[in-house]
């Protein structure tokens, strides 16, 4: 049934989110928010301190590094050299989205597993060359150096993992060529210029207050979401519409379940009970969620908050089931548990805009 497809979809979306920080991408030369440290050196050697958008972190580099503010495959801070052959990206994930006993080494294993599960045919398996430890911003960091290839391009990379009170941080330095001793020395020097300024959880961008209408893939329905959320251009296991703002880990999927594909006498209450029971997970102390009655644009329904644990990541879904004449509708908004309470009311508002189109 569609709920099973929904769970698989959520797993895939979470993998995409968690592995975004492992990928490299071209970075345009966007002016940095910066301050000069020394005016006595040459232009290319002048140290410049660059900040993430909301000043969560800072790093000091020579002025031939530039900051990117593009949101494709978003990070807290992404930089590249002028010739675009080397890049640095700084990512963080909210510890509140993970089980309390998740250690830094646990997260490293999860990160590695997710990278491997999403490697495409053009990318060969990573080869780890060496591992080490560093102290970064007074915190112990685990460092790994590796190399990989994408199509005909060879890449070297060094990644450092460290943890704070509220986040796991990942600092990745990538070069289009195999690393030399100079690259290793650069990474060590660069990492000593990294500082965490504000560790409180925050969004990379805000959802737009303007709502845009989206149709199902066969125009069966419409729903309104913020205008800066993007419709996914790939189909996820039978869903009829997928929209997300990946920068904030906001996701939505809609499924239509024809009644003829299930027991034609299945009631809304029975269908809702079946969906609710799929969330139960005694091993992780997850109970069957309570269900409340709703009515949206003439369709009666059931709404619940479903919890799941995927690779130690805690996911919360606002799951709404509506009954139409010949099908059930499942509208699922989901995000990490650490963020859900802040966006629940917004998810309910977007859900309330669902409307069936006339046929």
Image: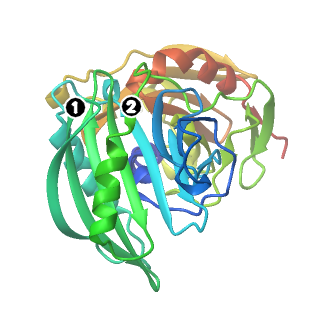
Q: Which residue in the rendered view is the most extreme toward the right?
A: 358
Q: Horizontal and vertical percent for residue 231? A: 68, 49
Judged from the image, the secondary structure of the residue bearing numbered disc 2 is: strand
Q: Which residue sits at x=28%, y=51%?
A: 188
Task: Say which residue label 2 marks.
Answer: 195
Q: Nearer the viewer, residue 235 or 255?
A: 235
Q: Which residue sits at x=39%, y=31%?
A: 195
Up-down relation of residue 353 to residue 133 (above or below)? above
Mark 2 Cα shell of 10 Å, populated few (<14), some (14-19), many (≥20): some
Is 315 on the left-hand or right-hand side of 358? Answer: left
- Which of pointers 2 and 1 lies earlier in the amino acid sequence? 1
Contact flag, marks 2 and 1 (Cβ < 8 Å): no
Q: Horizontal and vertical percent for residue 99? A: 23, 28
Q: Quadrant of residue 164?
A: top left
Is 14 on the left-hand or right-hand side of 182? Answer: right
Q: Of the numbered discs in the image, which one, if any, rests on residue 139?
A: 1
């Amino acid at each position: 049934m569609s709920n099973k497809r929904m769970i698989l979809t959520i797993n895939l979306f979470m993998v995409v989110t968690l592995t975004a920080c492992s990928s490299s991408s071209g970075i345009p030369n966007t002016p940095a928010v910066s301050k000069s440290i020394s005016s006595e050196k040459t232009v290319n050697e002048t140290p410049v301190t660059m900040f993430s958008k909301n000043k969560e972190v800072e790093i000091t580099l020579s002025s031939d590094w530039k900051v990117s503010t593009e949101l494709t495959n978003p990070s807290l801070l992404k930089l590249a050299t002028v010739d675009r052959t080397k890049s640095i990206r700084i990512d963080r994930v909210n510890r509140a989205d993970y089980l309390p006993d998740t250690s830094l080494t646990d997260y490293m294993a999860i990160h590695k597993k997710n990278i491997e599960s999403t490697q495409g045919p053009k990318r060969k398996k990573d080869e780890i060359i060496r591992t080490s430890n560093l102290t970064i911003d007074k915190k112990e960091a685990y460092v790994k150096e590796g190399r990989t290839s994408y199509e005909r391009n060879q890449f070297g990379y060094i990644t450092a993992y460290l943890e704070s009170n509220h986040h796991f941080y990942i600092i990745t330095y990538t070069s289009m060529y195999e690393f030399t001793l100079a690259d290793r020395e650069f990474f060590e020097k660069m990492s000593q210029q990294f500082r965490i300024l504000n560790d409180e959880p925050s969004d990379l961008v805000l959802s737009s207050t303007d709502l845009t209408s989206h149709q199902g893939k066969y125009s069966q329905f419409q729903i309104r979401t913020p205008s800066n959320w993007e419709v996914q251009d790939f189909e996820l296991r039978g869903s009829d519409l997928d929209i997300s703002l990946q920068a904030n880990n906001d996701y939505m999927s809609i499924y239509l379940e024809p009644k003829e594909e299930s027991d034609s006498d299945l009631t809304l209450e029975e269908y809702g009970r079946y969906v609710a029971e799929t969330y139960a997970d005694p091993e992780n102390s997850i109970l069957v969620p309570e269900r409340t009655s709703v009515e949206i644009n003439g369709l009666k329904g059931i709404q619940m908050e479903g919890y799941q644990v995927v690779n130690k990541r805690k996911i919360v879904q606002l799951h709404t089931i509506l009954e139409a004449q010949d099908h059930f509708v499942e509208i699922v908004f989901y995000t990490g548990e650490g963020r859900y309470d802040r966006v629940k009311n917004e998810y309910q508002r977007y859900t309330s805009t669902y409307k069936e189109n006339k046929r």
